[in-house]
Amino acid sequence: LDCRRDAVLQVAASDIKIVRRDSVIKKTLGKRSKSDVEFSSDKSLLNFTKWLAYKNNGILNQQSLIQRLSDTTSHPDFIMRISIAVSPITSHSPAVVEIRKHPRIKFLMKDLVEKEMLTEEMADYLVKAAKSEFNIIWCGEGGSGKTSNMNALLEEIPADESTLVIQETLELHSNH
């Protein structure tokens, strides 16, 4: 399982960001680079964006210029978080789209310690806090490990306990 977890995380791009019809940025193994993918026109980009929103139960119109969606069906190993903004929110492009890939096979707290995302003391504190029903707020920049940490911590909650997690998209899941 540990080998598969590492392999799953290294498959292709982890992030795709469309900032203009001729500017698609990908992030692979932590490095950002410009993709050779381009849309033929601004209208083509907007049509793709509307289709992407519709496919994932969202809608883009004058009342809903920003959408945050989850795609849980397109890939068996990943959940996709999709953020969309359209004009007039976006001034330089008819639409901006960001797609982030989160693995369905998640890290456990011991994995995060081994990968030096947390120290043993930090992991112990978080587990004790979660079991003591403390409120925990996660914040940080994109790709800093918030979702990985929350998913790992969920597995530490005893199966006969319940917890409330408020998150905008469907990236958290538990085995119990």
Image (spheres, grey):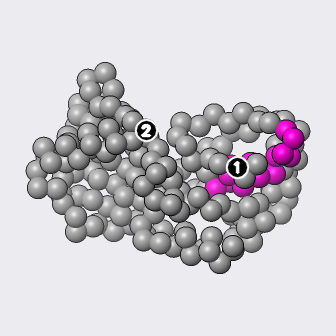
In the rendered structure, the answer to whether residue 147 lies left or right of residue 45 reads right
| Viewport quadrant of the N terminus | bottom right
Location of residue 164 in the rendering, given as x and y in whole percent from the top left corner = 72, 33
Tell me the mark number nearer the camera, choosing from 2 and 1.
Answer: 1
Q: Residue at x 36, y 64 (%)?
A: 26
- In the foreground, 127 or 49: 49
In the rendered structure, the answer to whether residue 134 lies left or right of residue 11 reads right
Query: Given the current orientation, which residue lies at the most extreme bottom position?
Result: 3
Q: Which residues are magenta?
A: 148-161
In the rendered structure, the answer to whether residue 150 lies left or right of residue 78 reads right
In the rendered structure, the answer to whether residue 4 lies left or right of residue 108 reads left
Q: CA distance from mark 2 to mark 1?
A: 21 Å
Magenta stretch contains residue 160: yes
Residue designated by label 2? 68
Q: Residue at x 43, y 38 (%)?
A: 68
Residue 130, image quadrant: top right
Helix, strand or loop at label 2? It is: strand
Helix, strand or loop at label 1? It is: loop
Residue 46, image quadrant: top left
Badges 2 and 1: C-beta atoms under 8 Å apart?
no
Location of residue 134 in the rendering, given as x and y in whole percent from the top left corner = 82, 36
Q: Is residue 148 visible?
A: yes
Residue designated by label 1? 174
Location of residue 78 in the rendering, given as x and y in whole percent from the top left corner = 51, 59
The label number, if any, that marks residue 62 in the structure image: none
- In the foreground, 144 or 72: 72
Looking at numbered disc 1 in the image, what kind of residue is underneath it? Ser
Magenta stretch contains residue 41: no
- In the foreground, 176 or 17: 176
Q: Residues within 10 Å of mark 1 (few under 14, many from 20)?
A: some
Q: Residue at x 46, y 59 (%)?
A: 75
